[in-house]
Amino acid sequence: MYYRLMRYFIVVCQALFLIAMGGVFVSANAQNIVTFKGKVQVIGKSIEVLTDTNANMPLAAAIQSAGYQKTDNDFPNLDTKPYGYWIRFTIKNQSADTTLAVQFTQPMVDYVDFYQLTNGKVTQKNTSGHRLAFDTRIIKHQTFIYPLNLKKDSESTFYLYVKSGKQLILPFYVGSMAQIVERALFKDITFGIYVGIILVMILYNFFVYTSVRDKNYLYYILYLSMVLLTQASMEGYLLRFVLQNHPLIADMLIYITSALIGLSAIEFSKSFLLSKTYTPGLHKFSYVFWVLYSFQILLAFLGHRNLSYTIMLSTAMFSALYVLFMAIRILLKGSRSAKYFLIAWSIFIVCVVIYVLKDFNVVLPYNDLTNSALLIGSALEAVLLSFALADRINVFKKEKERSQEEALRALQENERIIREQNEILEAKVSDRTFELNKTNRELSVTLDNLKQAQSQLVESEKMASLGQLTAGIAHEINNPINFVTSNINPLKRDIEMMMDALQTIEQVGLSDKPVEAKQKEIDILKEELDLDYLNYEIKHLLKGINEGAVRTAEIVKGLKIFSRLDEDDLKYADLHEGIESTLIISNNMFNNKVAVEKDYGELDLVECYPGKLNQVFLNLISNSVYAINKKFGENAGGIISIKTRQHDGHVFLHFADNGIGMNQDTQHRIFEPFFTTKDVGEGTGLGMSIAYNTIKRHNGNITVNSKQGEGCEFIIELPLKLQ
């Protein structure tokens, strides 16, 4: 941003200076000849300039033109106009060195056509510029250096056609090739030192940021990066070392980085100076510059580079004044950071003034030191602002110490007040103790009553579940027991008949009757008793008794698994086994009208409280049966679906039904204690609340998906192992 201000400041000051001095050009009479006697010299006052408003005049027309005007300044300023300019000068060599060179130290010129004429013939020509590939230059340097072969006492005339979409100043130097190369090398070393300083400041502030985590350092690192990129672009180093084959990109970066450095400087200044706190109005006004700089970049992309550059200079000046005004306002409000900011700014302004004055070559001479004033000022500013940022650490430290001292004083004052209050309170404590004890006793009684009420409600839910469980067990056990009781009497009768038959057969067998008579008598007995059917009936009755006993054993086993006497112990359990035991003891609820569809996946053993989970399964199944009965009544058609899956260390249990479902409000409240949709006397409203708390105790989740009239699905997610 400050670099842009300097450029604009140069234009304004030079314009005023030229008005006071009578203009940049004077009438051209006889052409001045540059006489080289062995020392590097500036030839600005010896060149002639021809303005080509159409920007298409050929060399032949330029040679014949009488419109050249001499310049009256060592460094003529041609402003930012979309014109082309023919530059003409004649050099006579009166030194012993025959290898001379002309250096045009304006790296941002878009196009430069160079011609050397000796005896009216073109003996050397070159076309290059910032918008052309770097390899087009005779000497591979960011400035334009042209070698001249002039024998002693010989002379040549030189024509240069220049055109630029940026500020155009004409600093021409003539000297021996060695002298010009030495100047170029000094410029490179100077810029290298500058780059080193900026990089050191970037690294230093980055390391500080990693320690303090203050975002101001990030803003400043961004600003320094933009400063370095802009300087490298405008000094031609970006084209020379990075974008040699992409000159159009390098040239466009001048317009882009010029805007980015201004915006980064504004944002850093706002953050560093805490403008949002001290000057909120000015803080909001800064976004105007975002619009202006964006418009400037857009113009550059649309090809209006001269207008873009002019707007950039104007915006840079006003943004610099904006930051200066904001810093002064904040300084007047007592900000220590603003003081350091203004010191850094003031030193940079001094360097800008030095840079401007050397262009006039009146107060200060134009030399390598004054020509590097901008880089020096920018580097000093970077260092000083880095110190200012570092000072913030000291400010924060002092503020912390001051806060600690204030806190200590406040603590001491509080201790004094507390001691005084304690004396007063101790006097009142004895008066309030009796009342508090009385209140505590009342609260204790109330708490006991609440605990009893809670216990009664929980016990009520347990008794309701127990009653449901008992009824189911009684019904389930009664059926197989009936198998046994109903078969005992017939079996007893058949066995008695069989025993009588055996005794008779034994008597017949022991008698002295002939074998044929014995066999006949036995056959008659077997026919009377229908012994084959009697044998079949005994087997059938025994089979029924056996089935009843097996069924009873299964029910008892399922009851044992469901009840889990060790339910308070954490253990690994088979959830499929728990679901099956729950289905067994709740089988009577289905009443042959509800079908159960099971889709079991492969599940590992789950670390859990099995008895608690079985109670959750029973609650979900009983609720599904209730919802199905509400929908189908005495008719069949109800379906309960149970699906299990395992994924990524968790098991997922899906309990779904095609009952009446529930609306959104019911889904939101289903896990609330005492909330129920059942009729009075059919439920306490604690079942789903207990189920929810049980799943949470297992570090799991239970969710519900339902549509009214279509059914309901509960999804339980449990980890395989409790953490």
Image (cartoon, rainbow, N blue to C red):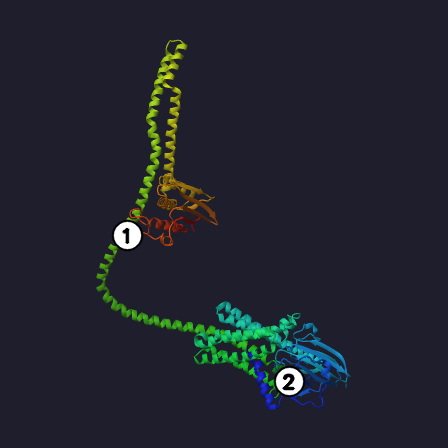
**Residues tagged 2 and 1 counted as in contact (Cβ below 8 A):** no
Mark on residue 296?
A: none
Mark toward the start of the polypeptide (2 vs 1): 2
Q: Is residue 13 above or below residue 196?
A: below
Q: Is residue 87 left or right of residue 298?
A: right
Q: Nearer the viewer, residue 336 or 516?
A: 516
Position of residue 478 relative to residue 103, above or below, is above
**x 38%, y 24%: residue:** 537
Q: Which residue is mark 2?
A: 76
**Residue 21 located left or right of residue 566:** right
Question: Does dot 2 land on a helix, a strand or a loop?
Answer: loop
Mark 2 nearby-residue class (10 Å; few <14, some 14–19, many ≥20) = many
- Name the quadrant of the N terminus: bottom right
What percent of the width, then of the height, locates residue 134? Answer: 68, 73
Near mark 1 (Cα within 10 A), the count class, few <14, some 14-19 or many ≥20, is few
Helix, strand or loop under label 1: helix
| In the displayed structure image, the side of residue 425 where residue 300 appears, left or right | right
- What x and y, as percent, mark residue 220? 52, 72
> Residue 129, image x and y in percent?
67, 76
Please tell me which residue is depicted at 34% across the width and 48% down the height of the picture.
Answer: 687
In this orientation, does residue 573 appear? no
According to the image, label 1 marks what residue? 451
Q: CA distance from mark 2 to mark 1?
A: 98 Å
Residue at 33% x, 37% y: name it.
475
Disc 2 or disc 1, which is closer to the eye?
Answer: 2
The image quarter in which residue 503 lies = top left
The number of discs equals: 2
Q: Nearer the viewer, residue 68 or 279?
A: 68
The amino acid marked with disc number 1 is Lys
Callout 2 amino acid: Pro
Q: Is residue 27 visible?
A: yes
